Image (tube, rainbow, N blue to C red):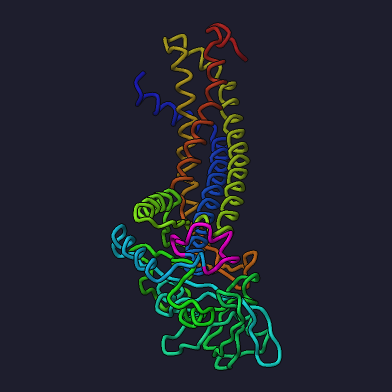
Amino acid sequence: MNGRVYLQLAWRNLWRNRRRSAATLLSLAFGFAAVTLFAGYTFAVYGALSNAAIHAELIGHLTINRQGWQTEGKLHPDKYLLRAEEIAQVRSLVERRLPGARLVPKLSASGLLSNGTSSTIFVATGIAPADLDLLRGPFRFAPGALQADKPQGVTAAQGLADVLGLKMGDSASVLASTLHGQANAADVDVSDTVNTGNVATNDKLMFMPLALVQGLMDAAGRADSLTLLLPGEGAVDSPDAEQRLRDMYTRPAPSEAQSDALRTQLTADFKAAGLDLEVRTWQEMSAFFRQVKGMYDMIFALMLAVVLAIVVLSIANAMGMAVVERTREIGTLRAIGVRRAGITRLFVSEALMLVLVGTLTGLLLTALVRHGVNAADIRYVPPGNTQSVPIYIGFDAARTALAAVVLAVLAVLAAYWPARRAAHHSITESLGHV
């Protein structure tokens, strides 16, 4: 028999017992849909977390600082801060390697924020107002921006402002240490407040103009880190908040391999120029992203294993029953000249058809559920957040294809062994089977 005849026979045999085949197909379709929906959900979560790390946490795509700054920078800040001429040299090297990329100098500070009667600690990021808008990307229209025409204007986290009873337009004082350990103070105006969405930072974070922080720390023209934003990023996005939130799930971010390649290239450029600098990727700097991704990857692997076990057992049961019920038919086919391999091939073809129809049905269910969930605007508050976000289900083509291939391989194995065992029975035994 040729391949076409095998397929025709397999399709007809598949529906000889419609009830059993339908039950097997439904279990396969619902199991496959569950896997693809969870894969799509985690795919969207990874996209949102990557964009939140790059733009909301202001990590950017790459971070450049002096070698050893992470461990010794707080003890010897004057030694590990980048000077103005070094920043200019790094900018030139980056533009040569990545035309159109943007380099954002930042200087962090910490100390006390006072409303005149009480004080609390703050952790501030010093950044130029225009650079902050660029780095925030899809968040640039949200509250929290700095204003170029207000050199003393700062943006305080909502929790920090609430602790001191500060509102927009109020004045306050900041106290911090200079590079040489001396106390220095400055007056600031609360030009905006922002909910960071994270309970760990909402009561202490503050954005300050870079020049203000440099003056406060007696570090004119200096920065502790340079944040690199790749070409094409930071473009003006829709001012609609809901659309921005949806875009977070679909905006692509550089993969780990791409980030590592860029880091290697820039590190080599800096070394050749005599600069002892360290380059870190956004994946390295966002511990939250790594932890959540690792957790979801483990959950997906466990879920895939459970679903595959249930579905494969269902297929194995269906094919095993089919082999037992058609033992005399197998003997007849062997008697008219069909080889043992042909018998096995016939049942394997039936199993593959089950998988094909089941996965196609599962993909249809996935599309329907995905559309319904995305349109329903179902919201929840993730761990560590203070604001709700919508549940969004994307489509992970790679893991969907992986699940389909693994399912097909296991289905073939589930059909192969009982069919092979039946095909190796003697013809007389098979014809006499009751």
Q: Where on the picture, by quarter, is residue 233?
A: bottom left
Residue 138 in sight from this viewpoint: no
Image location (x, y in percent) of residue 371: 48, 61
Q: Which residue is at a point 56% across and 88% down the rendered structure image? A: 186
Q: Is residue 26 left or right of residue 159?
A: left
Q: Is residue 92 magenta?
A: no
Q: Nearer the viewer, residue 131 or 200?
A: 131
Count of numbered tags? 0
Q: Nearer the viewer, residue 315 or 23?
A: 315
Image location (x, y in percent) of residue 125: 53, 74
- The magenta segment is 60-78
Q: Which residue is at a point 43% across and 58% down the rendered structure image? A: 253
Query: Which quadrant is the N terminus positioned in?
Result: top left
Residue 223 versus residue 291 in the image, above or below: below
Q: Is residue 10 left or right of residue 95?
A: right
Q: Which residue is at a point 60% across and 88% down the rendered structure image? A: 173
Q: Which residue is at a point 63% across and 76% down the rendered structure image? A: 204
Q: Where on the picture, by quarter, is residue 276?
A: bottom left
Q: Nearer the viewer, residue 154 or 49?
A: 154
Query: Which quadrant is the C terminus positioned in?
Result: top right
Residue 358 versus residue 392 in the image, above or below: above
Image location (x, y in percent) of residue 24: 57, 38
Residue 418 versus residue 86 in the image, above or below: above
Residue 408 versus residue 112 in the image, above or below: above
Residue 274 in sight from this viewpoint: yes
Q: Nearer the viewer, residue 105 or 385?
A: 105
